[in-house]
Image (cartoon, rainbow, N blue to C red):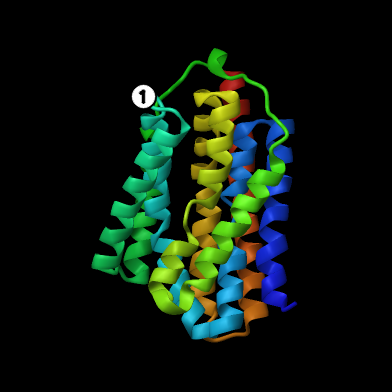
């Protein structure tokens, strides 16, 4: 069994398992925040780099960065449509909105610099675009469905990576950002624990996408000039620093609000 096949079959489902457990212990916001770290797109881009080369994967990472906007569209569309539909209807609306955003991205092909600006602006305004639900709505009971989440994630990852050669570097990068976590985690959370829990998960994802965007930027800049190991190691370290920094900033803000 090749290293890339092991990566596809075991790493991402394991990460889904770990994030699901974390969410059940510390809440949906934490699960969403963790899931936005490049736990799906990262392994996909590594597999793409090993199979198709650094230049191909660097271009794919540019597409993945731009696709953060499409995933934000997915999250916001799911949050609002969940007020009118159940899981299936909400996913249909969210995935349709995501597909439209992908078509626009593929048609416009924004440069790396433009993607950085657009993604930064989108991440700044996205938290204000979610419906607000009272805390009392949070609740529900989680069921033992981890195996189905893991299988669903593995199937999606394999589908995207095996399609990379036919899609081309940029489009394969965009689909590396396919909302695997949004589909799997949010769908199951909505079904078992209600709309408010699902929206809390989505809010956490949006906050975590700052680190994801930094990861994609570093990969796209370094991968053409350094080895796969160095480029991805640097990208993960930078993303981790941003992720922890944002979390610490949240702690400071809560402390400041509590003190006023």
Instruction: Name the residue: 57% across, 79% down.
Output: 49
126 left or right, relative to 191: left
How packed is label 1: few (under 14 Cα within 10 Å), some, or many (20 or more)? Answer: few
Instruction: Name the residue: 32% across, 65% down.
Output: 114
Instruction: Name the residue: 35% across, 59% down.
Output: 117
How many numbered badges does the structure rendering display?
1
Quadrant of the image containing the C terminus: top right
Instruction: Name the residue: 49% across, 15% down.
Output: 134
Q: In the figure, 15 relative to 144: above or below?
A: below
Q: In the figure, 166 relative to 81: above or below?
A: below
Nearer to us in this view, 214 or 81: 81
Q: In the figure, 98 relative to 169: above or below?
A: above
Nearer to us in this view, 175 or 204: 175
Q: Estimate the x, y position of residue 69 in percent, counting from the top left.
A: 38, 53
Residue at label 1? 84
Quadrant of the image containing the N terminus: bottom right
* Residue 191 visible from this viewpoint: yes
Q: Estimate the x, y position of residue 43 in percent, counting from the top left.
A: 62, 66
Q: Estimate the x, y position of residue 88 in percent, counting from the top left.
A: 44, 35
Nearer to us in this view, 1 or 65: 1
Q: Estimate the x, y position of residue 244 in percent, counting from the top left.
A: 65, 49
Nearer to us in this view, 154 or 213: 154
111 left or right, relative to 30: left
Give the structural element (helix, strand or loop) at label 1. Answer: loop
* Residue 39 visible from this viewpoint: no
Q: In which image quadrant can residue 33 be found?
A: top right
């Amino acid at each position: 069994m090749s290293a890339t096949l092991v990566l596809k079959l075991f790493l991402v489902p394991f990460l889904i398992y770990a994030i699901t457990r974390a969410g059940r212990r510390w809440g949906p916001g934490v699960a969403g925040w963790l899931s936005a770290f490049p736990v799906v797109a990262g392994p996909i881009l590594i597999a793409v780099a090993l199979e198709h080369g650094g230049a191909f994967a660097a271009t794919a990472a540019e597409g993945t960065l731009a696709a953060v906007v499409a995933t934000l569209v997915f999250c916001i569309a799911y949050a609002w449509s969940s007020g009118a539909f159940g899981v299936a209807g909400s996913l249909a609306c969210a995935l349709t909105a995501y597909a439209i955003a992908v078509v626009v991205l593929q048609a416009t092909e924004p440069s790396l610099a433009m993607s950085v600006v657009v993604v930064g602006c989108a991440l700044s305004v996205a938290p204000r675009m979610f419906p607000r639900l009272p805390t009392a709505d949070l609740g529900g009971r989680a069921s033992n469905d981890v195996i189905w989440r893991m299988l669903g994630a593995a199937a999606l990852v394999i589908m995207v990576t095996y399609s990379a050669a036919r899609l081309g570097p940029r489009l394969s990068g965009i689909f590396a950002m396919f909302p695997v976590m949004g589909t799997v985690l949010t769908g199951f959370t909505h079904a078992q624990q209600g709309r408010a829990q699902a929206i809390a998960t989505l809010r956490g994802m949006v906050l975590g996408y700052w680190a994801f965007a930094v990861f994609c930027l570093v990969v796209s800049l370094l991968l053409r000039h350094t080895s796969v190991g160095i480029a991805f190691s640097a990208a993960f370290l930078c993303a981790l620093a941003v992720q922890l920094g944002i979390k610490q900033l949240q702690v400071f803000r809560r402390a400041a609000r509590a003190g006023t």
